[in-house]
């Protein structure tokens, strides 16, 4: 399938000092659909720059340091029943680059309460739990993220 059909996107794997990652519950779902903060990569923007911008937009702070950018780009298709009107029907899914960051702020900096907040709640979770928390069509993406970023988690834990 043509790559032009997929929106360039960044997923943010935000680790805390305990090597857990931030996940957030979407506002537009009736049941808790936990996911990583993510968003579009704008023209001329790198995945890393997009990660810091999206972090600020979605959780209210970008107080973090860069750890790693994924080596792979993973595309997923949004089921047709969920994409009606999504992004003006320009894309059928997203092509995702994951970026790992370490949060160096305090939990009081995390603020989801913007006017058009995408999320209603957040929590720190084990990296390995990601695929079970996410909606089905994103599970392959999250399994790849777990595989690629588990060494960071292990390294962080070994330094404690």
Image (cartoon, rainbow, N blue to C red):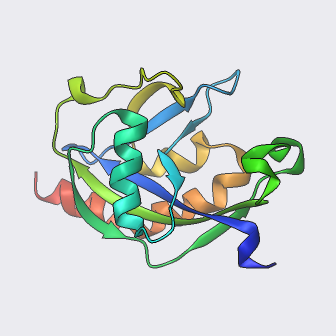
Is residue 114 positioned above or below 95 on the image? above
Nearest the camera: 157 or 2? 2
Residue that appears at 41% across and 58% down: 50
Residue 92, x across and y down, in percent: 79, 60
Q: Is residue 57 above or below residue 29?
A: below
Q: Nearer the viewer, residue 159 or 59?
A: 59
Q: Residue at x 73, y 52 (%)?
A: 137
Decide if residue 102 is on the left or right side of residue 115: left
In the image, 103 versus 148, the foreground residue is 103
Quarter that holds the N terminus: bottom right
Where does the image place residue 86, in percent across and percent down from the top left?
A: 76, 45
In this view, the residue in front, 75 or 19, is 75
Q: Quadrant of residue 106?
A: top left
Residue 44: % across, % down? 45, 71
Q: Residue furthest left?
A: 160
Residue at x 70% of width, y 62% of height: 76
Specify whether 48 is left or right of 7. Answer: left
Left or right: 30 in relation to 15: right
Q: Is residue 42 above or below residue 38?
A: below
Q: Position of residue 17 (x, y in %)?
A: 18, 44
Total labels: the figure holds: 0
Residue, x 40% and y 70% (percent of image)?
46
């Amino acid at each position: 399938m043509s790559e032009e059909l997929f929106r360039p996107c960044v997923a943010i794997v935000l680790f805390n000092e305990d090597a857990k990652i931030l996940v957030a519950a979407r506002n537009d779902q009736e049941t808790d659909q936990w996911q990583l903060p993510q968003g579009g990569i704008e023209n001329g923007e790198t995945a890393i720059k997009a990660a810091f911008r999206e972090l600020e937009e979605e959780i209210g702070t970008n107080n973090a340091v860069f750890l790693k950018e994924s080596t792979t780009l993973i595309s997923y298709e949004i089921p047709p029943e969920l994409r009606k009107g999504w992004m003006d029907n320009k894309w059928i899914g997203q092509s995702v680059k994951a970026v790992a960051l370490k949060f160096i702020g305090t939990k009081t900096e995390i603020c989801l309460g913007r006017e058009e907040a995408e999320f209603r709640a957040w929590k720190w979770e084990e990296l390995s739990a990601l695929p079970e928390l996410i909606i089905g069509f994103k599970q392959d993406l999250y399994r790849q993220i777990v595989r690629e970023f588990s060494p960071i988690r292990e390294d962080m834990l070994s330094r404690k």
